[in-house]
């Protein structure tokens, strides 16, 4: 169909791995019985392989209905849906859903099954060998930042909300589907956990390059996570489909400008990520290292604290040199309030995290939660100044 809204081109996208497939919607419509107007009225949309596309719009505009038609949890009344080269509109929905991961709020885990059983469900249904399922469970828990030995045999109620959500993502990825649908997945967790989960998703997506369609109520979340954003109005009418940068710079209609909000200039900060700043490299020490030696190294480097790494290389605390000097070896104490963000975190996220922890800096996590460096509040303030000058000029 020639009037399908094409996927806008991404400006100078860095080379990324792509394991997803394109999604093409043609005239997709849903009429619920007893309603005068269709909930989704002839939507045509192209989503490029490996991109994250965010659906935003007012409550009741049809976002969830449209999302659920992609994996046919809701049957379209009209229109066609293609995954890659394949028209899947009349494919068996059960078959289809094995190729499309689905993540909902609070993870949607089965409470009577362990974490491992939840994650391994689809591979088992697909008839994978037991050994392969077991290996896949551990690989995925590791991918979403949960130690398999600690979490594999727990039940969902023994996990925090954020951990349940991570398991939900692991489960959706289990059979390596090319497409991931996410319906307000991070809506039920506190702001700091939400930010961590967003960072994790950015990291995972850089590694995997799935095609992700993500419904959210939070425009900042859309700006942060989306390669593209679709702004819908009633009946899932597409008002604008573009990159976050383009939508912020040039809202298509007054309606979009209202939706984006008055703080559009400030929202540009949501577009600036921690990985665009120069991270400070600080002295690290491993649990059990000689404390005096760690202190000497830190002094020589001009640091007044040491970042302590656990046996997997993940930061667990950042004691001052005075604190370390009182010990003989570097202690295994985990500082629950250690402010950490991922490389994909925005400057807003980093500031929020510092404020929540009453600290003047954050530890930045890189691949598999290892340390990438430290960002201070001063570095963020400088970046904010620069952004403001650029936006004003
Ligand atoms: N099962 C159903 N039967 C009848 N009408 C429905 C059904 N599900 C949704 N609707 C209606 O279809 C419209 C779109 O609903 P949908 O849940 O897709 O919107 P949404 O944009 O996802 O909303 P929200 O942001 O509040 O989740 C709404 O008017 C809703 O009342």
Image (cartoon, rainbow, N blue to C red):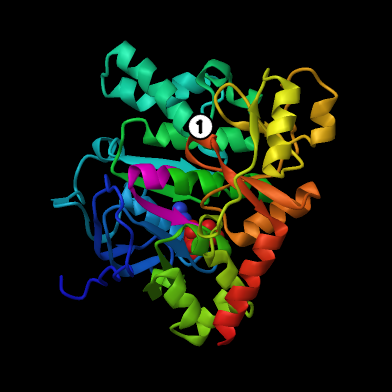
> Callout 1: few (<14), some (14-19), or many (20+) C-alpha neighbours within 10 Å?
many
Q: Which residues are magenta?
A: 204-215
Reading the image, the residue beneath label 1 is: 167
Q: Nearer the viewer, residue 66 or 243?
A: 243
Callout 1: helix, strand or loop? helix
Q: Nearer the viewer, residue 185 or 112?
A: 185
Image quarter of the N terminus? bottom left
340 to the left or right of 215: right
Quadrant assignment, res 100: top left
Residue 206, horizontal then vertical, whole percent: 39, 47
208 to the left or right of 170: left
Decide if residue 37 is in sight here. no
Residue 390, horizontal then vertical, whole percent: 55, 80
191 to the left or right of 173: right
Residue 373, horizontal then vertical, whole percent: 59, 45
Residue 83, horizontal then vertical, whole percent: 22, 51
Let me know if residue 383 is in the magenta part: no
Determine whether 287 is above or below 376 in the image: above
**At 54% across and 64% down in the image, what residue appears?**
272
Quadrant assignment, res 384: bottom right
**At 47% across and 27% down in the image, what residue appears?**
141
């Amino acid at each position: 169909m020639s009037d399908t809204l094409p996927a806008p081109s991404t400006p100078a996208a860095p080379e990324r791995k792509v394991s997803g497939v394109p999604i093409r919607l043609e005239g997709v419509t849903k009429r619920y019985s007893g309603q005068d107007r269709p909930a989704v009225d002839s939507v045509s949309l192209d989503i490029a392989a490996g991109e994250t596309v965010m659906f935003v719009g007012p409550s009741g505009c049809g976002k969830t209905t449209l999302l659920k038609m992609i994996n046919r949890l809701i049957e379209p009344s009209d229109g066609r849906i293609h995954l890659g080269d394949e028209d899947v509109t009349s494919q068996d929905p059960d078959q289809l859903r094995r190729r499309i991961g689905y993540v909902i709020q609070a993870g949607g885990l089965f409470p009577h099954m362990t974490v491992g059983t939840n994650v391994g469900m689809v591979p088992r249904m697909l008839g994978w060998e037991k050994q392969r399922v077991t290996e896949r469970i551990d690989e995925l828990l590791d991918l979403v930042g949960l130690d398999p030995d600690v979490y594999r045999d727990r039940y969902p109620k023994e996990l925090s909300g954020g951990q349940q959500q991570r398991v939900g993502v692991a489960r959706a990825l289990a059979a390596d589907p090319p497409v991931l649908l996410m319906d307000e997945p991070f809506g039920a967790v506190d702001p700091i956990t939400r930010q961590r989960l967003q960072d994790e998703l950015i990291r995972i997506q850089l590694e995997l390059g799935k095609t992700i369609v993500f419904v959210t109520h939070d425009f900042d979340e859309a700006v942060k996570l989306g390669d593209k954003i679709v702004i819908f109005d009633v009946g899932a009418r597409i008002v604008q489909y573009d990159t976050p940068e383009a939508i912020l710079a040039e809202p298509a209609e007054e309606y979009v400008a209202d939706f984006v909000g008055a703080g559009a200039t400030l929202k540009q900060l949501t577009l600036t990520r921690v990985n665009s700043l120069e991270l400070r490299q600080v002295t690290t020490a491993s649990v059990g290292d000689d404390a005096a030696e760690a202190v000497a190294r830190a002094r020589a480097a001009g640091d007044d604290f040491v970042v302590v790494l656990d046996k997997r290389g993940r930061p667990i605390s950042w004691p001052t040199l005075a604190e370390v000097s009182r010990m003989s070896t570097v202690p295994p104490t985990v500082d629950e309030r250690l402010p950490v963000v991922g490389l994909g975190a925005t400057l807003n996220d980093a500031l929020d995290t510092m404020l929540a922890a009453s600290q003047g800096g954050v530890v930045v996590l890189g691949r598999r939660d290892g340390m990438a460096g430290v960002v201070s509040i001063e570095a963020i303030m400088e970046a904010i100044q620069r952004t403001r000058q650029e936006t004003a000029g």
